[in-house]
Image (cartoon, rainbow, N blue to C red):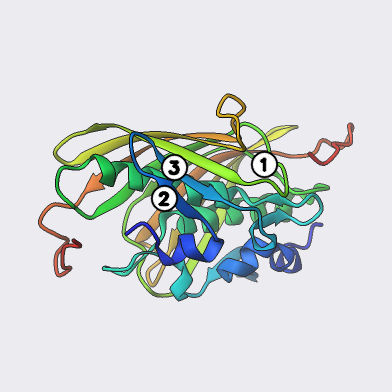
Amino acid sequence: MNLTAYLAGIGGEIVDIWPLARARLPYAEKLIGDPATGVVHGGVITGLLDHTCGIAVMAKLREPLPIATLDLRIDYMRPAKPREDIVAECDCVRVTHEVAFVRGVAHQGDANDPIALCTGAFMLIRGGVAGIAVAS
Amino acid sequence: MSEPFSLIETIPYCAHLGITASVKDGALLLTMPFAAHLIGNPVLPALHGGVIGSLLETAAIAQVIYETGGAGLPKPVDITVDYLRSGRGVTSYARARIARQGRRVVNVHAQMWQEDETKLVAALRGHFLIASSSKDQTAS
């Protein structure tokens, strides 16, 4: 559940799920978004935060349910420093019957000096999607 | 730098995701064929939300380069992605338009779809900083 093809493909790993979901992503050439500076692509940060927020939701659910991102807002505070790991830490703030609300931060060792902040909402898919089996 | 096609392909993360750019009917179009390493939910299977966000953000950046031709890549300030449908295991497309261009910041809207352009999979709104012509911005 934690190691999806996407996360494995970018070389990230989930290192904790409770009380905060935490993922670590080592720097790699294939993550670069600006070849002139070596800074990783913003989409890498989006992907890592989206994934880690999803883990935070699943860790908070009392029963395993498939989830789907409804929306995600990312504020990019500063470019990630090249050749340093990126850490994402996400918290599921509230779960309702249908929707879970999350917030998260991406940083490089100091959460008070963030690369990016995010807030988002996930749908909880109860009873499965039409024609699609429920994940367990 | 104003040539977005070759530029997109020189970005390692875009190459990792398999994103290419072309011009169709006078507008920039980004294409991302399906691949196993783009999956976020193996049960459905569905594209990872991060992949969808990455394609949209790349479409926004490419559009800004295409229209402004500024020096250096536009830097994202903030983005909001609305996920409207599950991204299925087929080719994805994205295009963007500039809603407002200021001197330093651009507001961009981007959309992604798969087989039917009227059935959007996701939409992005975002702000990007562009290098001003009067003051050369150093890479950060």
Q: Does B24 sit left or right of B81 as displayed?
A: right
Q: Does B99 sit above or below residue A103?
A: below
Chain for numbered disc 2: A
Look at 52% across and 48% down and name the residue there: A24
Residue flagged by tag 2: what amino acid is it?
Answer: His
Query: Dot 2 corresponds to which residue?
Result: A51
Q: Residues within 10 Å of mark 1 (few under 14, many from 20)?
A: many
Q: Secondary structure at mark 2?
A: helix
Q: Which mark is residue A80?
A: 1
Look at 60% across and 68% down and name the residue there: B16
Q: Quarter of the image containing the C terminus of chain B?
A: top right
Mark before the other along the chain sequence, 1 or 2 = 2
Q: Does B105 sit left or right of B91 as displayed?
A: right
Q: Residues within 10 Å of mark 3 (few under 14, many from 20)?
A: many
Q: Secondary structure at mark 1?
A: loop
Residue flagged by tag 1: what amino acid is it?
Answer: Ala
Residue flagged by tag 3: what amino acid is it?
Answer: Arg
Q: Does B138 sit above or below residue B38?
A: above
- Residue nearest the viewer, comparing A68 with B20: A68
Q: Is residue B20 visible?
A: no
Look at 48% across and 64% down and name the residue there: A8
Quarter of the image for residue B14 reads bottom right
Q: Does A94 sit left or right of B108 as displayed?
A: left
Between the C-alphas of marks 1 and 2, the distance is 18 Å
Kindly report which numbered mark, 3 or 2, lies closer to the viewer in this rendering: 3
Give the percent coordinates (x, y) of residue B60. Answer: 60, 51
Share a chain, discs 1 and 3? Answer: yes
Q: Is residue B117 visible?
A: yes
Query: Dot 3 corresponds to which residue?
Result: A22
